[in-house]
Image (cartoon, rainbow, N blue to C red):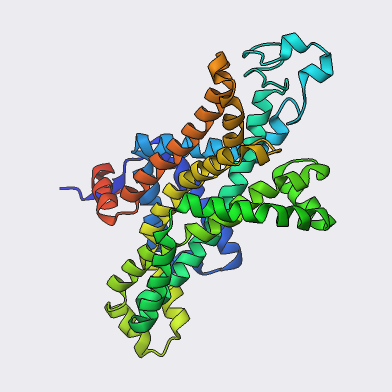
Amino acid sequence: MSELDEVYEKSVLDRFSDSLIYLLVAFITLFKKDWKRRNKSRIDEWRLMLYALNRSPIGLSGLVLGLLFIITGILGPMMAPHSYDYSFIVATGQYNKYYLAPPGTGGAILGTDDLGRDLFSQMLYGARVSLVATALVLPVGISIGIIIGLVSGYYGGWVDETLMRFTDIFLAFPGLILALAFSSALTDRLTMAIAYNKYLTGFISTLFGVRPNDAINVSPILSIIIALWVVWWPGYARVTRGLVLQEKNNVYVEASRALGLSTPSILFKHILPNIIGPILVLMTLDIGGVILTEAGLSFLMGAMMKIPDWGAIVQHGSTFLVQGKWWIVIFPGLAILISVLGWNLFGDSLRDILDPKTRRSIEFKIKKKVKKE
């Protein structure tokens, strides 16, 4: 009787994901020669995670929508047919034709606002604002929360009590109201700082895709980002602390202490990699949360917004909704909905993908027995 061997029954997506893993491994090997051999099990886990994602229609749909948001945010200002302040009324002198023009009028694919500005172009610039806000808020908020959670959970005692009561103070305030208060107070100071620093002006204009003379108008958005730093870390501190309390008495942590490893080494090289899964899931879900919160704050501060932002566009368009000018609200609202929904779908699937039991069940399903060569 011939011997049988087990191999993976791969789909086209599996082969594509394998190619991505091999490219990543080859890149890492350029800097760490023996990395591939020493991390074979880790590479196999990465492959299984992508196999699990490939078999999740919801997760793939969320990933596609999330990538669409990222690509639009990066390339939006370059893809926009017109500048964010281009007005058909000024350019053509036809006030009646382009005043709150419906979708498809002239070159306005999604219509125009009351100033004759192209709504489609404004939404593409608004995608850059949402992407930059997300990219700046989450790393800072997550880092602060993780550090506080690691220290609090590992040391316990009075350190834990002090840090957690400090966290409770921030959790006691409604996050949106606290962020609104901080952002309102910071706007004028940021405007002054940008106006008197030409290097900061150039950096901000490049980052947000606006002209240098409009960089000072980005200050309300920057104030929102800073305000979200203040309110975004407590959730990560709580989650990280709970995970550390479960891990700190495990054998590998005791062994690390016995070997004389420093506390930072134990926290960041041993405990953190073992608890990163739930944090990654929370981070993915929070991408949609940041988009929604930033849009909400922009809506509330709409009068201060001179740069296109999805929330500010909705706030401005709501004035004309009763006149039947629905497109100014519906289209940016759909952009917010699709972006948030995509990250929520992907985050929900990521929870299953990072679960070893789920990965193993998928592994058994895609293996088949073949004759050994």
Measured from the top left, where is residue 296 in percent x and y?
52, 41
Looking at the image, which is closer to me, 320 or 311? Answer: 320
Looking at the image, which is closer to me, 331 or 283? Answer: 331
Q: Is residue 174 above or below residue 94?
A: below
Measured from the top left, where is residue 267 in percent x and y?
42, 76
Asked if residue 304 can be seen in this view, the reply is yes
Q: Quadrant of residue 72?
A: top right
Q: Quadrant of residue 96?
A: top right
Looking at the image, which is closer to me, 258 or 343? Answer: 343
Instruction: Determine the residue positioned at 58% across, 56% down.
Output: 182
Instruction: Determine the residue positioned at 24% across, 54% down.
Output: 357
Looking at the image, which is closer to me, 90 or 334? Answer: 90
Q: Is residue 245 above or below residue 316?
A: below
Q: Quadrant of residue 126?
A: top right
Measured from the top left, where is residue 334 in percent x and y?
50, 28
Instruction: Determine the residue positioned at 46% across, 53% down.
Output: 175
Instruction: Determine the residue positioned at 76% across, 30% down.
Output: 85
Asked if residue 51 can be seen in this view, the reply is no
Measured from the top left, where is residue 71 in percent x and y?
60, 38
Number of disc labels? 0
Q: Is residue 107 above or below residue 191?
A: above
